[in-house]
Amino acid sequence: MIQQAARDYAQRELIQDVLERDEKAIFPEKHIKKLAELGFLGMMVDPEYGGSGMDTIAYVLAMEEISKIDASVGVIMSINNSLICYGLNKFGSEAQKQKYLTRIASGDIIGAFLLSEPEAGSDATHQHTTAEDKGDYYLVNGTKNWISNANSASVYIVIAQTHAKKTHRGINAFIIEKNTPGITLGPHEDKMGMRSSDTHSVMFTDVKIPKENRIGDDGFGFKFAMQVLEAGRIGIASQALGIAGGAMDRAVAYSKERKAFGTELANHQSVAFKLSDMAVKIENARNLCLKAAWLKDNHMSITVASAMAKQYSADIAMEVTTEAVQIHGGYGYVKEYHVERLMREAKLTQIYEGTSEIQKIIISRNVING
Ligand code: COS
């Protein structure tokens, strides 16, 4: 039912203005409202806190369908569900859940996750943003980079260093309202793909944060970020799976329609074998995503499973979309046929929420050290 609802919505409504949103980098405001109505912005949160009470499997299925049509909407959905709602639901205090989670999970407002910095992306332990403990409040200073939802979000979860000498064990995570004095945004980033999700840098100058907005114990911030990101990677993996699936659907349709040398492209083995390779990759990616989701739903470790799902799905999304462009020939290189957009979108899935190389660090450490 969830898969069908997501598919119907994506294929009937999201598709209509996706090319214009991509070209002009328009934030999909009306679609985010619709996702909220469908319950897709806090899918795994208990209804008591404004969510839909579904499981991670349902989330993967919905993410795939939405991202087949518009991965920019997929990333907004993924950040809200995984990085924000999951983090607050699992680690937030009761008061934080009442005050923030209920509104974010219901989609009344959305959230953004602020970890990356100009000099700290993959190497997340080296946070330059500081949160000085001033007794009854924290004072936050620094700059965060590449922040998805930076302008559209009302609430931020911000990772900052409180006790520099303790390195990553001195990092904290804070809930910060975007309209707090001292917060300014850099210009809208003009991105290669995922163009309708809004990305900015965010600057903090003497931003006062109430003590009760720290998530968890003092020094819990790095572990918080790692835990939230490993769950978030299931969302991005299913986004990549959706992008690959969207390209596959279009490549199949085109190759059954377009003729060359007297017959449809699909009758040429060079094309049919490409479609076969694409199908196997997509099936493998789907299985990795569903396995990671199942492990999470059953409260088992997802560190390696989510890294595998993300690395594989992102890498095959790049391969599958590239082949889809190739099958389309010249038509694949123009915007009207969508596959060049899907290829641009696929690229980002290899970069954000941990690059493919970071996932390989996580996987290889597990292979080597157990
Ligand atoms: N869950 C809980 N804790 C974790 C964890 C996880 N998945 N992964 C690491 N940690 C903990 C470790 O246990 C360790 O804690 P202690 O020192 O208290 O024992 C601490 O975090 C540091 O871990 P480690 O020594 O493995 O850190 P590294 O610097 O080697 O980095 C990686 C580990 C590469 C996994 C981490 O830096 C990472 O995920 N980087 C990518 C971050 C990212 O996704 N950036 C994208 C921006 S967000 S869009």
Image: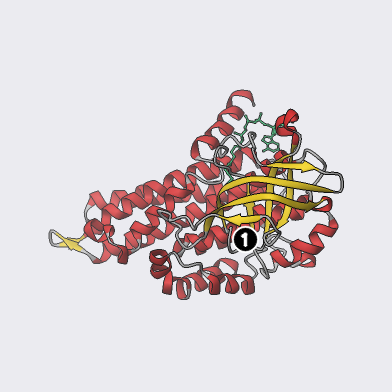
Is residue 291 visible in this depiction of the protein?
no
- Inspect the image, locate mark 1, and give the three-letter code of the amino acid beneath it: Ala
Foreground residue, 344 or 285? 344
Please determine whether, in this image, residue 296 is positioned above or below residue 32: above
Foreground residue, 91 or 171? 171
The residue at 30%/54% (across/down) is 325
Which quarter of the figure has residue 366?
top right
Image quarter hosting the N terminus: bottom right
Is residue 247 visible in this depiction of the protein?
yes
Horizontally, residue 215 falls left or right of residue 291, namely: right
Q: Position of residue 154 (x, y in %)?
A: 66, 63
Q: Position of residue 263 (x, y in %)?
A: 17, 62
Q: Position of residue 299 (x, y in %)?
A: 73, 46
Please determine whether, in this image, residue 297 is positioned above or below residue 364: below
At label 1, counting other C-alpha atoms closer than 10 Å, the crowd grade (few under 14, some 14-19, many 20 or more) is: some
Horizontally, residue 67 falls left or right of residue 271, namely: right
In the rendered image, the residue lying farthest to the right is: 136
The scheme the figure's colours follow is secondary structure
The residue at 44%/43% (across/down) is 315
Horizontally, residue 279 falls left or right of residue 235, namely: left
Please determine whether, in this image, residue 100 is positioned above or below residue 355: below
Q: Position of residue 145 (x, y in %)?
A: 55, 47
Horizontally, residue 210 falls left or right of residue 171, namely: right
Element marked by disc 1:
helix
Q: Quadrant of ligand 1?
A: top right
Which quarter of the figure has residue 132?
top right
Residue picked out by circle 1: 58
Image quarter hosting the C terminus: top right
The residue at 62%/37% (across/down) is 124
